[in-house]
Image (cartoon, rainbow, N blue to C red):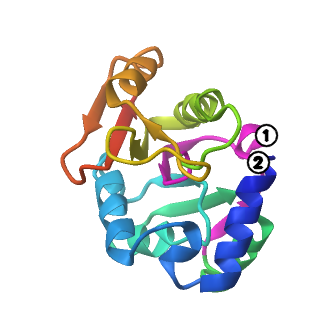
Amino acid sequence: MDQRLMRFYDEHLQRYGAHDPRALGWRSAHSQQERFKVLAEIGGLRNTSVLDEGCGVGDLYPFLEERFPGIQYTGVDINPEAIAMAKEKHPDAAFVCADFTEYEGGFFDYVLSSGALTFHIDGHEEVYRAHIRKMYELSRIGAAFNVLDASAITQDEEYAGYVPSELLAYCQTLTPKLTLRHDYSPEDFTIYLYH
């Protein structure tokens, strides 16, 4: 567990509270919702099970629940404070406090991750590639995640960016069935991986 990561989120959660997207490092509610919209375009999510990797305070849950009837949502996050807030905000959803590398909660139709792979931790590329692999392995239909584009952000101690072609090449070692979305923000891109 990266202590800088925990400190960052603990400080932001205390400063902004559970109802402000800035608590999780989002610039605005609009940017958060735009990324959710693109993630949800991976496929037909109605009546499916979804795992939200790095769920934070569970903001993806109401976004999906109001658009896709019958969705069965589970959120997993390493931060106990975020999970406590998520359970309080969304008592009808399932949340688990766990390090995703050790998570053993079974398989889901889709595994989604919004913003969770962008914090600059030691060995972030290796760690997050392992997360992407596990997301794909736990999904029955597909997995999707968004990350920051290295050419559009300043790499610093907080945020890590990726070269789209390099990350796409890694994902092609997992499946030939994938899509890169770079049409909604100059600083962000999303990859869908399918079975």
Give how far across and how far down residue 57 sits, in percent: 61, 72
Q: Nearer the viewer, residue 2 or 59?
A: 2
Q: Which residue is mark 1?
A: 102
Q: Are marks 1 and 2 in contact (CB under 8 Å)?
A: yes
State the SS at label 2: loop
Q: Nearer the viewer, residue 43 or 161?
A: 161
Q: Residue at x 75, y 76 (%)?
A: 84
Q: Residue at x 62, y 60 (%)?
A: 75
State the SS at label 1: helix
Asked if residue 195 shows in the view, the reply is no
Q: Where's the C terminus, which quadrant? A: top left
> Is residue 100 within the magenta segment?
yes
Q: Residue at x 55, y 48 (%)?
A: 156
Q: Nearer the viewer, residue 133 or 32?
A: 32
In the drawing, what numbered circle is on residue 119?
none
Is residue 76 placed above or below 120 in the rendered structure?
below
Asked if residue 15 shows in the view, the reply is yes
> Is residue 11 within the magenta segment?
no
Q: Nearer the viewer, residue 121 or 129?
A: 121
In the drawing, what numbered circle is on residue 99?
2
Is residue 132 placed above or below 189 in the rendered structure?
above
Residue extending farthest to the left is 183
Which portion, as a residue range, is magenta?
Answer: 93-117
Give how far across and how far down residue 154 sits, in percent: 43, 47
